[in-house]
Amino acid sequence: MGFTASPVLPRHINASLRTAALEALSTLFSDEDINILAFNLLIEHEDIAGQTRSARAQSLIEMCERTGRADLLIGHIRRMRPGAALPTQL
């Protein structure tokens, strides 16, 4: 019997948390902070699309949802910006 890796299932966050995360990333984080978040989430910052901070924030959220890392992203946002208004439910 060989080892079979289970597939990464997308983990979507609810709409209110997604909106709050986008708002937090767009207003409370610098471009460098977004790059650090990407690094911490094992995402190449060059893979984050967008010319504006809000576009890059949206791209990061979408990428984290596609790769099953949305909950990790929310955790990082909470740790880096404890005052950010994020709902508690994923």
Image: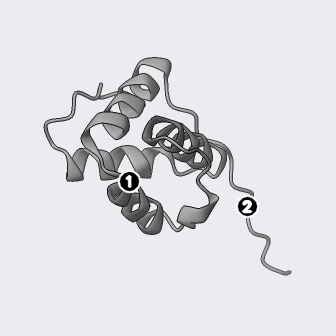
The residue positioned 84% from the left and 81% from the top of the image is: 2
The residue positioned 58% from the left and 53% from the top of the image is: 48
Kind of element beneath mark 2: loop
Give the amino acid at mark 2.
Ser
- Residue farthest along the left direction in this orientation: 83
- Residue farthest along the bottom direction in this orientation: 2
Residue annotated with mark 1: 31
Where is residue 28? Give x, y as percent: 25, 40
Give the amino acid at mark 1.
Asp
The residue positioned 63% from the left and 59% from the top of the image is: 47
Q: Quadrant of residue 6?
A: bottom right
Residue nearest the observer in this picture, 7 or 44 = 44
Say above or below: 3 vs 27: below
Quadrant for the N terminus in the image: bottom right
Residue annotated with mark 2: 6
Say above or below: 89 vs 48: above
Here the colouring is: one colour
- Residue farthest along the right direction in this orientation: 1
Kind of element beneath mark 1: helix
Mark 2 closeness class: few <14, some 14–19, many ≥20 residues within 10 Å: few
Say above or below: 54 vs 78: above
Where is residue 3? Give x, y as percent: 78, 77
Mark 1 closeness class: few <14, some 14–19, many ≥20 residues within 10 Å: some
Say above or below: 18 vs 10: above
Residue 43 visible somewhere in the drawing: no
The residue positioned 28% from the left and 29% from the top of the image is: 86
Task: Please indicate whether residue 76 sits to the left or right of residue 43 in the image.
Answer: left
Residue 62 visible somewhere in the drawing: yes
Front of the two marks 1 and 2? 1
Total residue callouts: 2
Q: Are marks 1 and 2 in contact (CB under 8 Å)?
A: no
First-in-chain label (1 vs 2): 2
